[in-house]
Image (cartoon, rainbow, N blue to C red):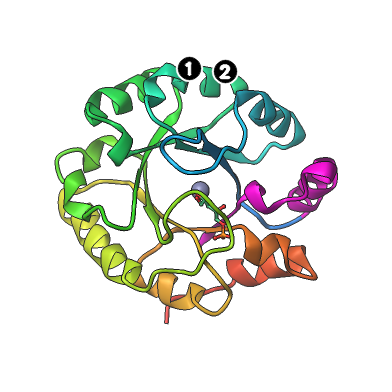
Amino acid sequence: MPLVAPSLLSANFLQLQKDCDMLNSSEADWYHLDVMDGRFVPNISFGPMLINFFRKATTKTCDVHLMIEEPERYAQAFQEAGADIITIHAEACTHLHRNIQQIRSLGVKAGVALNPHTPVHVLSEIIRDIDLVCLMSVNPGFGGQQFIPHTLVKIRELKELINSSGSAALIEIDGGVTLENAPSIVSAGADVLVAGNTVFKATDPVATIAQLKKVVAR
Ligand code: DX5
Ligand code: ZN
């Protein structure tokens, strides 16, 4: 049974309380919170202030996906805002190991995200030091894009790396996850499904989340 992490990027920002109430009443496991700086990605979303509102609106895990340059400048602010998991992009970090140490020293879980073009093996030396790997299955920056099928190959490679190294890292898939492709994503080895449009554009988001929770490996 996968963990389901709806991405609030696709929520209606004029009625966030309603969307939080919906998520809290659903089987969603995590809030996936997408932070964009307009530099690492060509879009700007929100920062620690809004994350602190989400923190107060839910007891669910706040999974903060930082699509920002120099994440070391903001890690503490996101921890103080209430993040449970802070995920940074390998492509944004010259000293990735140091960044992971910093996040863990703040007492939160550390994740690393990989863009579609970044091979899984860049994580081979640090896979035991991280709690989560977020494989981007779209180019980051926007919700509602199409799933890149090659991600399935990367999931299998990552699963092998995790198993062979004795790492406990979870595999999270972010971008273009639908009810149709979720079974093959879970079959390939994914543990966490991020879903933005699939949840928030559904006529019945709570039922859609329940359907994603029921996805089994084929
Ligand atoms: C993309 C974000 C994703 C996005 C997912 O840059 O990291 O979390 O919101 O949205 P969907 O599920 O609509 O592709
Ligand atoms: Zn994301």
Looking at the rendered structure, the kind of residue marked 1 is: Gln
Q: Is residue 75 above or below residue 115?
A: above
Q: Tell which quarter ligand 1 is in.
A: bottom right
Res 177 label: none
Q: Residue at x 59, y 39 (%)?
A: 61
Q: Are marks 2 and 1 in contact (CB under 8 Å)?
A: yes
Residue 10 belongs to magenta span: yes
Q: Is residue 63 visible?
A: no
Residue 32 point in image, percent of width and height = 58, 46
The alpha-carbon separation of the residues under discs 2 and 1 comes to: 6 Å
User: What range is drawn magenta here?
Assistant: 1-25
Residue 62 point in image, percent of width and height = 59, 37
Q: Residue at x 56, y 72 (%)?
A: 178
Identify the element where label 2 is drawn: helix
Q: Is residue 174 visible?
A: yes
The reply, left or right, for residue 139 in relation to residue 22 is left
Q: Badge 1: few (under 14), some or many (20 or more) residues near its Cα, within 10 Å?
A: some
Q: Is mark 2 within 8 Å of ligand 2?
A: no
Identify the element where label 1 is drawn: helix
The reply, left or right, for residue 107 in relation to residue 98 is right
Looking at the rendered structure, the kind of residue marked 2 is: Glu
Q: Residue at x 41, y 61 (%)?
A: 137
Camera-side residue of 213 and 120: 120
Q: Which residue is mark 2?
A: 80
Q: Which residue is mark 1?
A: 76
Q: Is residue 30 above or below residue 192?
A: above
